[in-house]
Amino acid sequence: MISKHLKWVYLIVLSIIWGSSFILIKKGLVGLSALQLGSLRIIFAALFLLVIGFKSVATIPKPKWKYVALTSLFGTFIPAYLFAIAETEIDSSITAILNALTPLNTLIFGAFFFEISFQKKQIWGVLIGFIGSVFLVFNGALNHPGHNYYFAFLVIIATLCYAINVNLIKRYLSDLSPLSITTGNFMVLLLPALFILIFSGFFDVVQVENVQHSVLFILLLGVLGTGIANVLFFKLIQIATPVFATSVTYLIPIVAFFWGLLDNETLTPIQFFGAFVILVGVYLSAKK
């Protein structure tokens, strides 16, 4: 009973944290390139997690490290760069909306490749939530005709990576603590991210004022939106179904839109309707 209510707490907290991540990426791109932003996000998260979770890494059995490496690749490394590149061309709120494809992809990958069972209510929940996202996507496209929506495919690829990641964790890493998985992930990623940062030219421009401001936004994104959020997310995967865990991506656009309002973006009646439909989808996808 406790875990039944606790999973909703995790879901809401994660939706607030990750819903705020897209505006942080947008602000970070003011002074940073996409490669610099993605690398700094990983590095800040890695340093934070090594401080709080280094001892927990010792609990990871050697045979499990290949899955830790795979989940770090699909769950963080590839998406971190894809989202940053995508937001150089499309709006942060649209990026958050496209991220809502994750539960649908999770259900598909889980059913066909990981033999994870699901019920009809979950399928309806995913489809209804996806329909709500479509309302938001098309309305956003109509209101932003100047955006290059080819970059939206990068977000879709990122959601496929997330789907693989969630199913891998549920199948192979559920017996490990969320902190050990997360810390292990970022230990694997620290050196590759540092290598990319060095060759991105970051250290040639770090003294520029707007670059320093952008770095502060990414520091917050890395520690809170990546490090702490991943620990919470892995715990959510363990106490709930993969589909329910990824249904957080249906709530993220709602949070992202309200941040957008503060950044001079607007919500239309259709977007409000889409948000309502998304909430219905989240509820149904949680039913067993």
Image (spheres, helix red, strand yellow):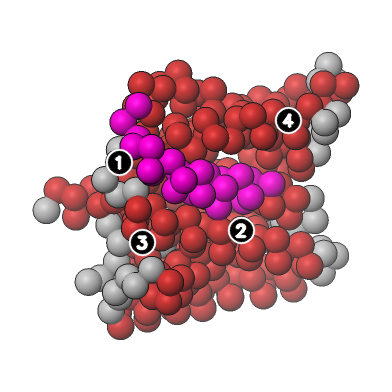
Of the pair 173 and 10, the residue shown nearer to us? 173
Q: CA distance from mark 3 to mark 2?
A: 16 Å
Image location (x, y in percent) of residue 116? 32, 70
Give SS at disc 3: helix
Question: In the visual, does 148 lie left or right of 263?
Answer: right
On the rendered image, what quadrant is the C terminus found in? bottom left
- Pick the residue in front: 85 or 13: 85
Dot 2, how many residues are within 10 Å of its Cα: few (below 14), some (14-19), or many (20+)?
many
Task: Point out the frontmost of discs 1 and 2.
Answer: 1
Q: Measured from the top left, where is residue 237 in percent x and y? A: 33, 53
Earlier in the chain: of badge 1 and badge 2, it is 2
Horizontal and vertical percent for residue 118? 30, 75
Name which quarter of the figure residue 269 lies in: bottom right
Q: Name the residue rendered at 43%, 41% in the picture.
A: 65
Query: Secondary structure beneath disc 2?
Result: helix
Question: Does the magenta portion include 66?
Answer: yes
Q: Is residue 6 left or right of residue 186?
A: left
For disc 3, the marked residue is 242
Mark 1 vs mark 4, CA separation in Å: 29 Å
Per the model, the C-alpha gap separating discs 3 and 1 is 16 Å
Placement of 56 over or under 138, stated as above or below? above
Q: Is residue 182 visible?
A: yes
Residue 176 has which mark? Answer: 1
- The quadrant where residue 21 appears: top right
